[in-house]
Amino acid sequence: MSTVFLNDAFMPITEAKISPMDRGFLFGDGIYEVIPSYDGKLVGFGPHIERMRSGLAALEIPLDWEPARWLLLCQQLIEKNGRGNLGIYLHVSRGADSKRFHAYPEGVKPTVFAYTFAINPPPPADKDKVQGFKVSTARDLRWQRCNIKSTALLGNVMHFQQGYAAGHNEIILYNARNEMTEGSSCNAYIVKHGTVITPPLDHQLLPGITRLILLDILRKDGTIPVEERTVTMDEVFDADEVWLTSSSKEIAPVIEIDGKPVADGKPGDVWLAAQTLFSANKYNY
Ligand code: PDD
């Protein structure tokens, strides 16, 4: 049975209990992270914790854990739950107040919850072995502060379900100007004439750590050009390749969108080169 961390203690998952007055439960008032770990090695620990700390500051949740404290927690969870392919889930809510009142309460201790779950092995940089993703598309109806990794994920959940019900692995979202924003749980990219193109960071999408690592690896390598700019859905449907990234997927090649194949319906050459570079360099972050 998995061992989880809740507030100041480790315990079996069945013993972990949270008050119904917790603002995470009542308002989705919290921040979370998912950090991948393969055989005890974390990918992107530094930037994940930096994003968590900036989200806590943006929401004025008073939890002042240093990165070393978070690292200790991650290491303890891996020790207690075994190595292997793990997602380490870290969750901080504003905590349990005595009343339900929208304004941020004073003097309430944040709730810290963390556990591990099994994730798929990283994708092999091999066109014949990688799983190609089939996706849907939808007008992005989530809230307008998607840059904060808030636990208020109902908009994301509803969009994901829309794709899932159609038998798809993900859904690509677009705004009122028909511009791609991101997936319901991942960042999105197109490849055109050998250039990797992804929307710039703003309030419409999460600053993904896999995105950060991938763009840095590609820029340092220098053989595949990268552009951060607006991408229209017409460009998505006309792309040579489409990709998704997240901590639990690394780079997923999209092979079908709304029932239509992306180019020849197979993972592309630029994906292969990028996933090969990512596999070789990801532990440097
Ligand atoms: N989701 N965009 C959204 C809306 C996400 O939920 C995620 C990650 C990403 C990619 O971020 P990163 O590369 O830092 O994982 C982009 C996590 C994995 C989840 O909710 O399980």
Image (cartoon, rainbow, N blue to C red):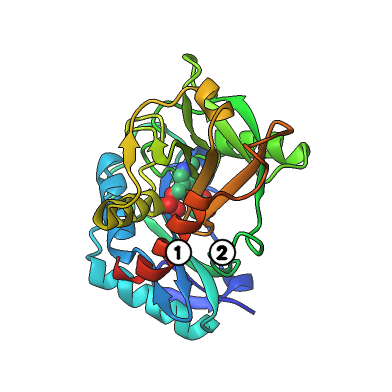
Q: Nearer the viewer, residue 173 or 52?
A: 173
- Residue 136 visible in the snapshot: yes
What is the three-letter code of the residue carrying label 1?
Thr
Nearer the observer: mark 1 or 2; the answer is 1
The crowding category of the residue bearing disc 2, from other C-alpha atoms within 10 Å (few below 14, some 14 to 19, many at least 20), is some
User: Which residue bears the numbered disc 2?
Assistant: 123
Measured as percent of width and height from the top left, residue 3 is found at 55, 77
Q: Quadrant of the C terminus?
A: bottom left
Residue 276, disc: 1
Which residue is pictured at 60% across the width and 50% down the height? 267
Residue 284: image location, x then y, percent? 29, 69
Please, what secondary structure does the residue beneath circle 1 have? helix
Q: Using the rendered view, name the quadrant where residue 119 is placed.
A: bottom right
Which residue lies most toward the top here?
A: 177
- The number of callouts visible is 2
* Residue 95 shows in this picture: no
Q: Nearer the viewer, residue 9 or 284?
A: 284
**Residue 120 pos. (x, y %):** 60, 66
Q: Amino acid at mark 2?
A: Pro
